[in-house]
Image (tube, coloured by chain):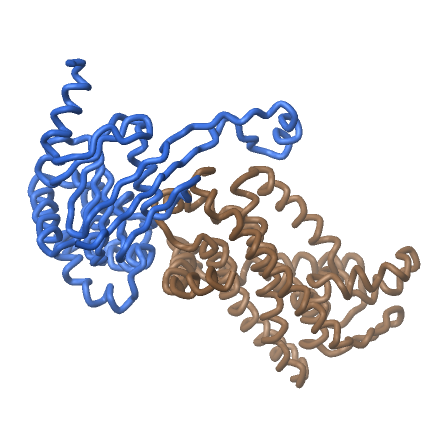
Amino acid sequence: MIREFAELLRYRELLLNLVVRDLKIRYKNSVLGFFWSLLNPLLQVATITIVFKIILKLGVDNYSAYLLCAFLPWTFFQMSVADSAMSVPFHGNLVKKTYFPREILPASVVLSNLVHFILALGVFFVYLLVIGTPIRITWLLLPVVVLIQLLLNLGIAFFVSCLSVFYNDVKYMATVVLNLLYFALPIMYFIEHAFSSDRIPDSLKPALYYWNPLALLLTAYRKILLPPFNTATLHDIPFNYWYLALAGVTSLAICLAGYAFFNSKKWRFAEQL
Amino acid sequence: MMEAITVQNLAKTFRLSHDRPGSLKALALAFRRMKLENLYALKGISFSVKAGETVAVIGKNGSGKSTLLGIMARVYRPTSGAVTMNGRVSSLLELGAGFHHELTGIENIYLNGSILGMRRRDITKRLDAIISFAALDPFIDAPIRTYSSGMVMRLGFSVAIQVDPDILLVDEVLAVGDESFQKKCYAKVRELQSAGKTIIFVSHDLDAVREVATRAIWLDSGEIRADDGVESVLDAYLAQSEGRP
């Protein structure tokens, strides 16, 4: 695996070029260009805010900020997985005719989504300052959380992109699972909702929200970027930063396992496509 | 002289694709009665090529020529046996691999060059040579969707030829562009030959083979039928394909 990684490093310029190409092409020939990257989550968040704050009357101050704070990283995850399912077949001609480390294909779509995510985070910070959120020292942890999520996204992308070469179903399955996860993960709701629910067995709660790296990361973004909230019915659960370390270890393991799995299959891609 | 390429007992077997389950459902249904039908594309061939030789590989469709080149280009892994390549390999199996029609000529040169394993600064150094060889100077800043198909091929050829390989693998791609561009291509191939580069050349165009190669390998259903000077192999090949004894 170390040899494979050295070969990948040798081809880093190709990786970079593919990322740049993705970014250049995505919104070429559209009037708003890059703003689509921001407009899309903003419109979704606006709709959800209207539904939850005005129609359902959920009484959390700045609900949009809490929502957006988990929604942007979710979009990063979701787009990385969805794009990676297409990454190898889309470059079928390249794979069948030229040599290069195949893992560059899923890695490049994850990295170009990372760029979009970082830009969206930039806009999100402007929004936070506009609504007057206090600057917090824990903001310094943001790069760590982003890095852990990058590892997780890469790992899942390796699995999905590799399997989708051999089974078309993976593409459809990814869409379905992503749609379910969107509702199941703490994006529109808070882990405080889940922990105050007596219908979920107490023994299950840590597994669902702390051990599961994706749910933990989405919550971590909220806890480090935004102040704790308290409403009449919900009480903020302080964040245990050791769980972040756990998520880091899990994500790294998923990334390495995905990479090893991908490498064990990648030389059959040319025969399969 | 040093061997540039050594091929030892090289075999490649493909599983026929219609027998592979394309989905999980098909896998579940076909699991028990799935019988694997194998296609023996190469059946244990051996040969070696000296540095500086130009070898043509000829044979009917499906004789294993492209599989052989694919293994040399590291697109496929051999089923058994081994190929050793001494030196930097560039493959012209697909011109303009990775070109994107929305990007400009320059952007595509960098993208394609990095796919072929070139460094950014090497590409920058050779940029002028690439553009002038392709004769695309006035259009190089336009997106290549505005190019004619001949122009795209010329650009792809120009990038690939500038990789500065020790071993060049060519699959039927010398016949691109108009007559004057083809002349340039052949001139470039001569230049590489006299610079001592090794060239492996797959073609159905026997005139081109005669013009470029000194040695020919005739592949027939995955086996070497003949491996000798280009004239004698071509004579035998033509005699066989015309049905003469």
Residue B49, position as x, y percentages in the image: 22, 46
Pick whichever, A252 or A3, lies toward us.
A3
Tell me if residue B21 comes above or below residue B107 in the rendering: above
Q: Position of residue B208 (x, y in %)?
A: 12, 35
Q: Residue at x 73, y 57 (%)?
A: A185
Q: Of B147 and B226, which appears nearest the observer?
A: B226
Q: Nearer the viewer, residue A24 or B236?
A: B236
B233 on left or right of B20: left
Residue at 25 percent across and 59 percent down: it is B106
The hue of chain A in the figure is: brown
Task: Specify the quadrant that holds the C terminus of chain B.
Answer: top left
In the rendered image, residue A246, in percent from the top left (x then y), is placed at 72, 70
- Image quadrant where one finds the N terminus of chain B: bottom left
Q: Nearer the viewer, residue B100 or A52?
A: B100
Residue located 69% across and 68% down the image: A247
Query: Residue B236 occupies which quadrant of the picture?
Result: top left
Specify the chain shown as blue.
B
